[in-house]
Amino acid sequence: MRNAKIRRTTKETDISMELCLDGAGKAEIDTGIGFFDHMLDSFARHGLFDLKVKIDGDLRVDGHHSVEDCGLVLGQAIREAVGDKKGIRRYGSFILPMDEVLVLCAVDLCGRPYFSMDAEFPTQRCGEFDTELVREFFYAVSYSAAMNLHIKVLSPGNSHHMIEAIFKGFAKALDMAVSHDERITDVLSTKGSL
């Protein structure tokens, strides 16, 4: 089982996280932001990752620090849990429909961080969640995990549908990237390392 357990404490947030890449989609999420809880639960369920997250953040300020720092911790957990990357597919991509919305997500666990996102949300908030924090979260995940991550909303629509499709699409692409392929006996790279 590929697992990681991370604790990150700053003056702004106190985050504990447990991630199992070889899970069954079980989630225990408490971030203090209901919509964000729903998105992380969707990520776990659709990626078939087991995920526990507890955040005590400075929500009296806003949700920025909690969401961004959660992205940093999730990226670190992915990097730790995936280990030496021997035998994994490395790449994953998924096009996910959700009602009127269509989202593309592509992942490369190459060890080199890069992030690109093409999405404009029609509303500023979903519940107590600022929609601009979607970009902050995934930027933090990509750089902390040292992954190449591209997200593109192909057909926009309702903000809730767009964000949920992004989280689910990322989950499916990541699940593909971390999956083992028996034909890959080392790391999938001409360099011999990732």
Image (cartoon, grey):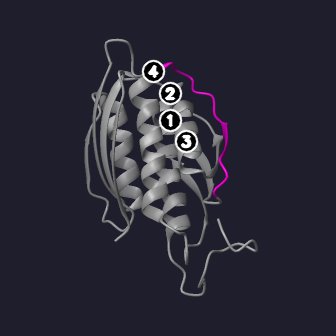
Q: Give the number of the mark in front: 3 or 2.
A: 2
Position of the C terminus by quadrant: bottom right
Position of the N terminus by quadrant: bottom left
Crowd rating for badge 4 (residues with CA inside 10 Å; few <14, some 14–19, many 20+): some
Q: Secondary structure at mark 2?
A: helix
Q: Which residue is mark 1?
A: 137
- The amino acid beneath tag 1 is Phe
Residue 71: image location, x then y, percent: 46, 39
- The amino acid beneath tag 4 is Arg
Q: Which residue is mark 2?
A: 133
- For the residues marked 1 and 4, what is the alpha-carbon distance in whole angstroms? 15 Å
Q: Which residue is mark 3?
A: 100
Q: Give the number of the mark in front: 2 or 4.
A: 2
- For the residues marked 3 and 1, what is the alpha-carbon distance in whole angstroms? 24 Å
- List the single residue furthest toward the top: 61
Q: Secondary structure at mark 3?
A: loop
Mark with earlier residue (2, 4)? 4
- For the residues marked 2 and 1, what is the alpha-carbon distance in whole angstroms? 6 Å
Q: Is residue 112 magenta?
A: yes
Residue 40: image location, x then y, percent: 37, 44
Q: Give the number of the mark in front: 1 or 4.
A: 1
Disc 2 and disc 4 in contact, CB within 8 angstroms: no
Start-end of magenta stretch = 111-125
Mark with earlier residue (3, 2)? 3
Mark with earlier residue (1, 4)? 4
Q: Give the number of the mark in front: 4 or 3.
A: 4
Disc 1 and disc 4 in contact, CB within 8 angstroms: no
**Residue 125 numbered mark, or none:** 4
Depth check: 158 or 118 in front?
118
- The amino acid beneath tag 3 is Glu
Q: Secondary structure at mark 4?
A: strand
Q: Is residue 60 left or right of residue 177?
A: left
